[in-house]
Amino acid sequence: MTIKGFLELITAVTPSLVSAWASSWYDLFKDTLVMRPGAPNSVANTGIAFACMLTIIFALLTRGWSARAHKTTALVLLILALLAGFICYWIRFKYQYPLDRVAQELLNFWWDCASWIFIVLIIQAILFASMFAVATWAGPKVPE
C-alpha cells in the first residue's frame, strides 16, 4: 500500500460522515418510547460513539462477505434491536406503578443501557442491510 492509499484509507474511516449518519438515525428515536425522558446526553452519545466505531470496523472487516451473510446478520441484529426496544418499553410500562427510589434508580440504569444498546444494534442492522443491498445490486444475480 502506498502512502497515498494509506491516507485515503484514513480519510475513509474518519468518523465524521459515519457520526452524522448515526446521529441522524438516533434523532429518529430520541423522542420515542425507546429513550428515557430526561436521560443524560451521555446515554445517546455512548450509543452513537459505539455505533460509529462498530460501523467502521464492520464495514471494513465484512466487505468480502456474501450478500446472504449480510442479510442474515442484518436480520439477527434487527431482532436483537427489537428485543432491546421491547425492554425499554417494558421499563416505561413499569413506571406507571408506584416505585421506591431504589427501584427507580435501578430501572433508570437498565433503561439507559437498553436504550444505547438499541441505538447501536439498529444502526448496525441498517449497516448490514445496506451492505446486503449493495452486494445484491452490484453482484451477479444468483438465486438465494
Image (tube, rainbow, N blue to C red):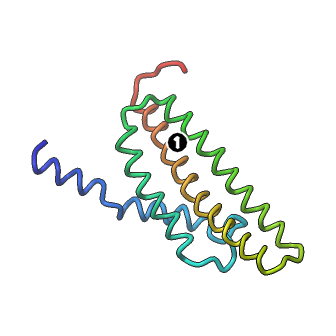
Residue 123: x %, y % from top left: 53, 54
Where 5 sits versus 89, above or below? above
* Picture residue at 55% right of the left edge, 21% below the top: 144
Residue 67: x %, y % from top left: 47, 30
Choose top left, top right, bottom left or bottom right for residue 93: bottom right
Q: Quick one: label 1, few (<14), some, or many (20+) residues within 10 Å?
A: many
* Picture residue at 83% right of the left edge, 79% below the top: 100
Choose top left, top right, bottom left or bottom right for residue 134: top left
Residue 101: x %, y % from top left: 78, 81
Where 60 sits versus 115, above or below? above
The residue to which callout 1 is attached is 129
Q: Is residue 99 left or right of residue 116?
A: right
Where disc 1 sits, the SS reads helix
* Picture residue at 35% right of the left edge, 61% below the top: 15
Q: Quadrant of the N terminus?
A: top left
Residue 64: x %, y % from top left: 36, 32
**Residue reaching furthest to the top:** 143
Name the kind of residue labelled 1 in the image.
Ala
